[in-house]
Image (cartoon, rainbow, N blue to C red):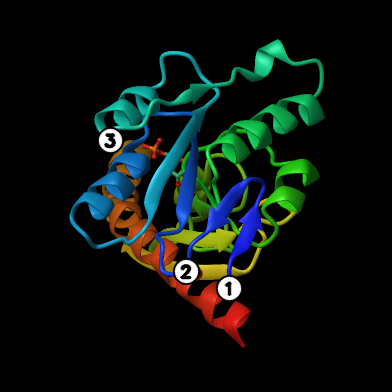
Amino acid sequence: MLTSLDGYTRIPGARPRVGVLASGSGSNLGAIAAAIAAGDLEVELAAVVCNVAGAGALERARRAGVEPALIEHGGFGSRADFDAAVVAALRERGVEWVVMAGWMRLVGVELLDAFGGRVLNIHPSLLPSFKGLRAIEQALAAGVGVTGCTVHEVTEGVDSGPIVAQAAVVVDPGDDARTLHARVQRAEHVLYPRAISAAIARRRARDER
Ligand code: GRF
């Protein structure tokens, strides 16, 4: 069956087209690109959208062979206008799955409606613990012995969509936010490509039913 996606025709068996949204250093973007290059993640990196000029994610995208779209939120009058520009950039590139990797903007209904159920995020805690900003600091302040990272579907609530996959990271007695975040990020880089694969396979199985 061929399904039209805003001008793009989905060819059965073709690799799903993924668009990554990033605001920061882009280490997760790098891990996703490396997994694709290694043949461990069977998707096409079709787009990278970044909202911060000078962010490391821009260079990582270029290294992965993708010219990133820089869409700075400061240039828009409202969040809805900004989201609409992001959706347009993703659609122009035929994106089917949206992968948020350090995207420091709340996601509006425009994006969720456009890609319903096909938007993923990674959060540096074992959700539902430590939602929102500074999750690593929250975990340290709570004194937990184990934290980690979670890949989840994005819904309207903050860090509250259905969980796709999690990885645990032990908190060492001498950890500070920097050392703990570094270990959580190493776990993220392994988890995210696998979770993307799992989410796509799960969705495909559901759509074929
Ligand atoms: C990650 O730790 C992720 O959990 C959080 O933002 C960070 C992004 O890091 N949402 P990077 O830009 O992928 O290096």
Mark 1–mark 2 distance (CA, rounded to whole Å): 7 Å
The residue where tag 2 is placed is 12
- Which quadrant, please, contains the N terminus? bottom right
- The residue that appears at 23% across and 47% down in the rendered structure is 34
In the rendered image, is residue 173 in sight? no
Task: Kindly state the secondary structure of the residue where label 2 is placed.
Answer: loop
The residue where tag 3 is placed is 64
Task: Kindly state the secondary structure of the residue where label 1 is placed.
Answer: loop
**Quarter-wise, where is residue 159 in the image?**
bottom right
Given the image, on which type of amino acid does mark 2 rest? Pro
Given the image, on which type of amino acid does mark 1 rest? Met
Residue 132: x percent and y percent?
62, 45
Given the image, on which type of amino acid does mark 3 rest? Ala
In the drawing, does residue 15 fall left or right of residue 172? right
Instruction: Report if the CB atoms under discs 1 and 2 are less than 8 Å apart.
Output: yes
Seen as rendered, the residue at the extreme bottom is 209
- The residue that appears at 60% across and 17% down in the rendered structure is 72
User: Could you tell which of marks 1 and 2 lies nearer the N-terminus?
Assistant: 1
The residue where tag 1 is placed is 1
User: Could you tell which of marks 3 and 2 lies nearer the N-terminus?
Assistant: 2
**Quarter-wise, where is residue 57 in the image?**
top left
**Does mark 2's beta carbon lie closer than 8 Å to ligand 1?**
no
